[in-house]
Image: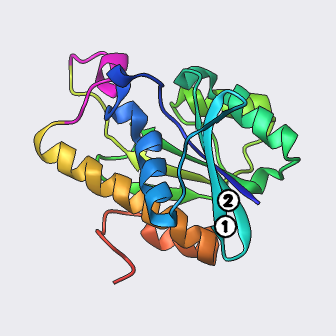
Amino acid sequence: MKLIFGLGNPGREYANTRHNAGFLALDKLADRLGITINTKSRDGEMGQGFVNGEKVMLIKPQTFMNRSGGCVFEYAAFYKAESTDLWVIYDDIDLPAGIVRLRAKGGAGTHNGMRDIIARLGTEQFPRFRVGVGGPPPGWDLADYVLAKPRGEEAELFEQAIARAAEAAEYALKNGVEAAMRYNGSQPNPEK
């Protein structure tokens, strides 16, 4: 079983913001897998299906971003999931806009949602799919930046990265996380 969490903030006012890249990528992955995310459970919205005979749950924590760890921990504990079966998709200001980077494990970087997940799980040993949103321009407050919607050329890069993160997660489900690292970088579609 794989539990895939897309991070974001609940509420209409946060839709399509940089900080909701995880929600957006999870929605794209759900479309690709034919899964509907519409069941409320354990502080999250969830949908489930099967990929290559393995159960897959797609989960959007419905706590605010900085408290994402509670939802992840509850699902992990209930399903007695190994940490390597918990995948997280989220925005990353430390990567340029449009870049996708997969890692099998690692620290939280500057992301408070990931810090909370690592603190609650007590481990960094879980795969993560990072969607680059770039850092704020000079003079911008970080919170204002991540809670804003990308514009212009950046919006295009953002959409491409969201789609690539979903493709990468689907590829990882079918071929493994290591194989899916071919999606690292900025190429539009490494499958072609």
Give the spatial CA distance, label 2 vs label 1.
6 Å
Colouring of the image: rainbow
In this picture, residue 154 sits left or right of residue 171: left
The three-letter amino acid code for the residue at tag 2 is Val
Q: Nearer the viewer, residue 187 or 86?
A: 86
Residue 103 drawn at (x, y percent): 58, 57
Residue 120 drawn at (x, y percent): 77, 29
Residue 143 painted magenta: yes
Which quadrant of the view contains residue 136?
A: top left
Question: On the image, numbered disc 2 is attached to which residue?
Answer: 56
Give the residue displayed 63% in from the left and 41% down from the top.
Answer: 107
In this picture, residue 68 sits left or right of residue 121: left
Question: On the image, numbered disc 1 is attached to which residue?
Answer: 50
- The quarter of the rendered structure image containing the N terminus is bottom right
- The quarter of the rendered structure image containing the C terminus is bottom left
Residue 184 painted magenta: no
Which quadrant of the view contains residue 59?
A: top right
Q: Which residues are magenta?
A: 139-150
Dots 2, 1 in contact, CB < 8 A:
yes
Give the residue displayed 38% in from the left and 62% down from the top.
Answer: 164
In this picture, residue 76 sits left or right of residue 3: right
How many marks can you see? 2
Give the residue displayed 72% in from the left and 44% down from the top.
Answer: 124
Mark 2 Cα-neighbour bin, 10 Å: few <14, some 14–19, many ≥20: many
